Amino acid sequence: MCVISQLNTNKMQFKSILIFLSFFLLLNCGDVKKENISQKEGVKQNKEKSLALYTNLKGENVSLENFKGKRLLVNFWATWCTPCLQEMPSLVHAQELLKDENYVLLFPTTDKLETIKIFNDKKKYPLEFLHYSGTLDQLNIYALPATLIYNAEGKMVKRIDGATEWDSAEIINLLKAIK
């Protein structure tokens, strides 16, 4: 009988320990979950802030917010991207065709600032090249070139992926129609 009593006591101690550990783990899981949510919210806020930051060739920060009231064509490209380079002359011409249409054309890339300067010195395109400090996947850009078009209120209203003939009548009319 003593052996049975001892086994029952051991079982009860084991159950008590098991309940205590379960309770302890549940409490800690709640804290971890709250911490993860806070971390995710912080990442989201940082991500939103980084979406607006660009650097011009002078090393000055530029924000898309600075262009409210104007329509924006933001063409993401890279110095190593052949389709990007092939569409540049048509972008230069489109910029000329849109000069009286309240448009600003910006050309951000994740290339290093020095690389962009060398490219600009060599090609001498009259375009506003910028360094983008975020990652392209933050903007759901997975291939270049990618162009985001914003209306005068700052809302993205059109996205064009891939190289485009920017000075074609069709594209110029599409851009002019955006208010």
Image (cartoon, grey):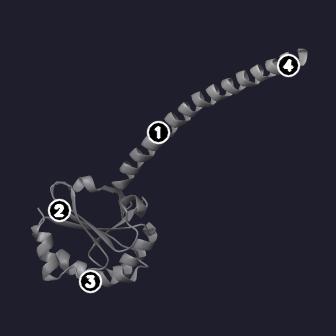
Dot 1 corresponds to which residue? 37
Residue drawn 40% across the image and 79% down it: 81
Q: Earlier in the sequence, mark 2 or mark 3?
A: 2
Decide which of 161, 175 is in the foreground and name it.
Answer: 161
Decide which of 41, 113 is in the foreground and name it.
Answer: 41
Q: CA distance from mark 4 to mark 3?
A: 91 Å
Q: Position of residue 17 (x, y in %)?
A: 72, 24
Q: Earlier in the sequence, mark 1 or mark 2?
A: 1
Q: Residues within 10 Å of mark 2 (few under 14, many from 20)?
A: many
Q: CA distance from mark 4 to mark 2?
A: 84 Å
28 horizontally vs 17: left or right: left
Residue drawn 36% across the image and 76% down it: 120
Q: Residues within 10 Å of mark 4 (few under 14, many from 20)?
A: few
Q: Quadrant of residue 125?
A: bottom left
Residue drawn 43% across the image and 61% down it: 135
146 horizontally vs 81: left or right: left
Q: Earlier in the sequence, mark 4 or mark 1?
A: 4
